[in-house]
Amino acid sequence: MTVSDQLQRDKALDITNSFIVQAPAGSGKTGVLTLRILKLLALVEEPEEILAITFTKKAAAEMRVRVMEALELAAGPPPENPYELQFYTLGNQVLAKDREHNWGLKQNQNRLRLLTIDSFCSGIVKNRPLASGLGVQFSIAEDPTELYTEAARELLASLDAGDELGKALRRVLGNLDNHFTKLSNLVIQMLAQRDHWLADVSAVHGNMDQFRALLEHSLANLNQDGLELVQAHFDPDFFPELEQICIYAKNQLRAQNLTHPLLDTVEGEFEHTKEQLKLLLTGQLQPRSRFTKNEGFPTGDNAAEKKLAKEYKARVKQLVEQLERSGEPGIASVQEFVNLPHASLSPEQWQLLDDVLQIMRYAAAHLKLVFQSQRSVDFNEVALSALMTLGTGDMPSDVTLLLDNKISHILVDEFQDTSFVQVELLDRLTSGWEQNDGRTLFLVGDPMQSIYAFRKADVGLFLRLWRSQRLGSINLIPLTLTSNFRSSATVIDWVNRVFKRIFPAAANTRTGAVQYSASVASKDAKPADAVSVTLFGHEKNQRASADVQEAHWICEQIKDLPRQESVAILVKGKSHVGHIVPHLKNAGIPYQAVDIESLSQSQIISDLLAAARALLSPNDKVSWFALLRGPWLGLTLKELDTLNNLDSVPWNALQKLEDCPWENDLTVSKLKHIRAVYQNAYLNRHRSEWQHALRSIVLQLGIPASARNKADLQSIDLFFGLLDTIDTIADIPDFQALRKKLDDLFVPPEIHPVGTRVVQVMTMHKSKGLEFDSVFLPQLHRKPRADDKPLILLDKQTAQVAEQQELFLAPFELRHEKNDSTVYAYLWRLQRQRLRNEAA
């Protein structure tokens, strides 16, 4: 088999140079990483000199398995396959090195430093507990929301204080219409993302004048970049002509005593140019087709005026025609430019920004105190503490110097999903490296697969390093892998043709726009290979009917597929599969929903919650009725009505069972049994923990016997495991916290007999790296859920034209200034654009 990009793959194994590699899906990225690791192992004195970092435990484990498989392969006869022979040859060299230096890699796999970024940071922090500020004993909270909530509660306790913090809190709360809960939720949201803003917000403290100059300089650069992009689409005489036309229009507007934005006083050249360009646009920012006296183009009262009016109306229409001829790119550049924020902030905006920054600093400080008191932290704190432990490039810590001596080669997988903190971590780790000193950096990823929502990843970082071809003092050689070993030629040709049109025409580090990189199929086309698009229509307000058609069609297609073929249904979001799963069940199609159905949606969990609420709240009618309708009792609606007639409180009604005749003796027997079970639980309520009482009730009622499968039984175990982590108030559990934790856990995949073709149902993000014979992509019209607007938005960029570092920081918008031209509105549009580019 001929590999079209073999030269690029060979270069990637040059362990004397550093690289940044674009490796699209199916390009054999993990194989390239494994081969490079093997080649490095054959070179270094100690395995610990090599550090390979990825972002998930699964990816780290896969890389470790691939390395060990290569060593196992090397212990046997040489393979005939040329690709496998590479692993065999390098594996033999590693085994020779292993024997020479007595590494014992097969017995001591931990000497292979193939780690997640979180694991690596934890190692730094735990080795220097005092320097990191975390101490020796701390745990990492899987769900740190409660820690953020406590910090927000402590912060907002200062609301009535007379100090500067109290005043800032009251001013910000006033701008939120005194919505206390909203302010609390915004603080919690920002604390979860503080790795994105804390360093910059802290740097601003005490340096507001310097920050103001930086922000206004960044805004000026932004406007300059925008203006130059507009100018690139038009003739040199376009703007001088527009200036003359606007002078005429303003004179006519004044003469007729009309109001128009052209007559407003604006500060700065950029705002002046924006108002002039808006003359050519409608309120919806589309090219204007009609010009009347309201825009400054009256018909005129006499022959001279009419002649002049006709001339200027023709001239302005010529500019509009030039705008239209510039096409979508030209029009889009104008639309973007006129909506760019002003190059300076108003005094009110500066006051709000100062207040919000003060609040966020105090919120972060309160969170530190909560971490210390709880001895529990989040992943962000570990990463930030690791960064602090390493010092700076100018003043590296002893930890940095130690790692500098130990680490000779760093490889980073999935680099498209990196963040500012992680790039800064790499920069500090390599701050002592010099060009051609034998140490190398290998960054590999696929910007076309970037997940912006993944822990605030920023694909723009990959694009900037790709463009600049360096990280700090390290030169990076760019490589692109184009061969695809996963899909057939038919699929690849279709994807190349369609995705070239879908993806942006050019990369943009601001918006995270990534240009499509075509692939070359390494697999031959087969007659059955195809890509098809099927549309499902519906009448107005009948969206559900199209969903039913789609689900039914998918089930029928799956039934017709050969039984030996693997099948997957991939969706953008977990909620997009809700209508499909019932159809799979009804069609008798075995399926596995991977992290799709939360525990809170499971029927068996709903039954357990009803049992728990009935135990803790005997008068909870809804929970009692749900419990009595369960399969272990199965009361009919008529029997529930009979019980309700005895007493509107179900527990009281159970005491009066003998007061009326029942048609079914078995029902009475079951009711007496449940009454006895709960009677005993109530009597012994304070003799043991309520969790133990609930477990006894569940077993006595036979709820586990109603489980449909092993997944239900596993869900029961997960439920009781969660109960021990829930706080109680007056011996009553926090059901709201319990339900949130149930929302965050998923029903275990159902286990099917060996040999059964099981359809895999998962999100597209979850499917990365997997391969199936047939894939269905339903609900492509659905959009991701819109995020709530945060308290502040921050963005660090590199100017498109000037190549200077920029910082944009803005608080939420003041009530009276909500428009498209604020800094906050610009940053929000930018964030939404990045998400749209990802979803494309």
Image (cartoon, grey):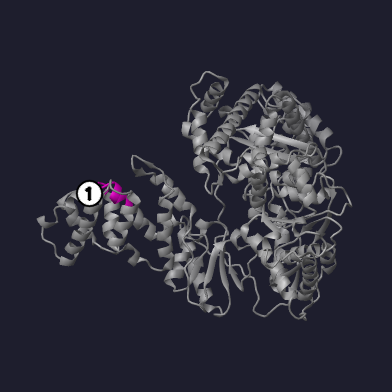
Compared across the picture, whether 556 is left or right of 344 comes to left
Q: Position of residue 175 (x, y in %)?
A: 54, 27
Q: Residues within 10 Å of mark 1 (few under 14, many from 20)?
A: few
Compared across the picture, whether 599 is left or right of 475 comes to left
> Can residue 273 be seen in the rendering of this structure?
no
Question: Depth check: 32 or 260 in front?
Answer: 32
Q: Quadrant of residue 47?
A: bottom right
Which quadrant of the rendered structure holds the C terminus? bottom right
Residue 619 is a magenta residue: yes
Q: Position of residue 434 (x, y in %)?
A: 87, 47
Identify residue for label 1: 683
Which quadrant of the rendered structure holds the N terminus? bottom right
Over which residues does the magenta segment extend? 612-620
The amino acid marked with disc number 1 is Leu
Q: Position of residue 680 (x, y in %)?
A: 22, 53
Task: Name the residue at 62% across, 70% down.
Answer: 532
Compared across the picture, whether 437 is left or right of 300 comes to right
